[in-house]
């Protein structure tokens, strides 16, 4: 779905910068993806080098494993509220609407990111767009509902593909055991309406439009970062 190896130094700069906003005692939402990987790594370094104490709530098996590698203590939303969530995105527009889910993790990401007191998005410059829509909208669906959901999405004007796995035969299975439909709309006039409309289709678990909650966007470049 995406080439995570691109723009590595920009992603690292964005991820490391976001870690500067982490304060001792915080509960952190740990997003998913190659940019967030650097954020989690830097938080781990701050625990090791500065002795800060934080707890992490992962949004995927990927972020769980990275957090464990860096000895970040893990908790859950059952036990703690989140002070700060940091996450990547596949697209961000000028009004801070996002498309997420290139890594198939948008359902847990949305639960965690929307629950956070503060939500920082970290991206490289290639993700910043005037409006959303170059990237298909990932839609997580219960497998049994996929044909009916595709039909409805096509009626809404989308070109749909069930996301296929690369090193496994057959479809991508999300961390929640579901399928993913990538729905390409020619234009997305109102992200907030589309976010609601997609979730009202029976069988849809969650979609990758994030039209709420973003407090800050950190954009990484080869030489540093700037913020929106
Ligand atoms: C995973 C996501 C990622 O945050 C998004 O795909 C960006 O990933 P990357 O930082 O690797 O470009 O939404 O579901």
Image (tube, rainbow, N blue to C red):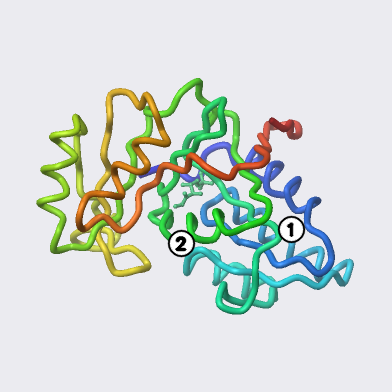
Q: Residue at x 41, y 47 (%)?
A: 102
Rendered view: 38 above or below 142: above
Task: Say whether disc 2 or disc 1 marks the residue closer to the N-terminus.
Answer: 1
Rendered view: 186 above or below 183: above
Q: CA distance from mark 2 to mark 1?
A: 22 Å
Q: Position of residue 209 (x, y in %)?
A: 41, 42
Residue of label 1: 42
Rendered view: 78 above or below 17: below
Q: Residue at x 27, y 53 (%)?
A: 180
Tag 1 secondary structure: helix
Q: Is residue 34 left or right of residue 146?
A: right
Quadrant position of residue 22 = bottom right
Of tags 2 and 1, which is closer to the observer? 2
Tag 2 secondary structure: helix
Q: Is residue 13 left or right of residue 2?
A: right
- Give 189 or 133, whichever is nearer the viewer: 189
Q: Is residue 78 left or right of residue 118?
A: left
Residue of label 2: 108
Q: Residues within 10 Å of mark 2 (few under 14, many from 20)?
A: some
Quadrant position of residue 78 = bottom right
- Give 150 or 193, whichever is nearer the viewer: 193
Q: Residues within 10 Å of mark 1 (few under 14, many from 20)?
A: many
The quadrant of the rendering that contains the N terminus is top left
Quadrant position of residue 27 = bottom right
Q: Position of residue 228 (x, y in %)?
A: 69, 30
Q: Residue at x 29, y 69 (%)?
A: 177
């Amino acid at each position: 779905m995406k080439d995570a190896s691109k723009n590595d130094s920009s992603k690292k700069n964005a991820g490391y910068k976001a870690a500067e906003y982490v304060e001792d005692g915080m509960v952190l939402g740990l997003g998913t993806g190659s940019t967030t990987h650097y954020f989690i790594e830097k938080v781990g370094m701050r625990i090791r080098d500065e002795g800060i104490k934080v707890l992490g709530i992962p949004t995927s098996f990927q972020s769980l494993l990275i957090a464990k590698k860096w000895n970040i203590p893990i908790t859950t939303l059952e036990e703690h509220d989140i002070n700060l969530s940091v996450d990547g995105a596949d697209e961000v527009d000028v009004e801070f609407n996002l498309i997420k889910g290139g890594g198939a993790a948008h359902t847990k990401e949305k639960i965690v990111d929307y629950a956070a007191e503060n939500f920082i998005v970290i991206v490289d410059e290639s993700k910043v767009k005037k409006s959303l829509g170059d990237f298909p909208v990932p839609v997580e669906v219960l497998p049994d509902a996929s044909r009916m959901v595709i039909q409805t999405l096509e009626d809404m004007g989308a070109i749909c593909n069930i996301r296929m796995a690369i090193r496994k035969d057959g479809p991508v299975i999300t961390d929640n055991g579901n399928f993913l439909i990538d729905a390409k709309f020619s234009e997305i006039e109102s992200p907030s309406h589309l976010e609601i409309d997609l979730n009202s289709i029976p069988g849809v678990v969650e979609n990758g439009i994030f039209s709420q909650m973003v407090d800050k966007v950190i954009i990484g470049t080869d030489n540093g970062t700037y913020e929106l």
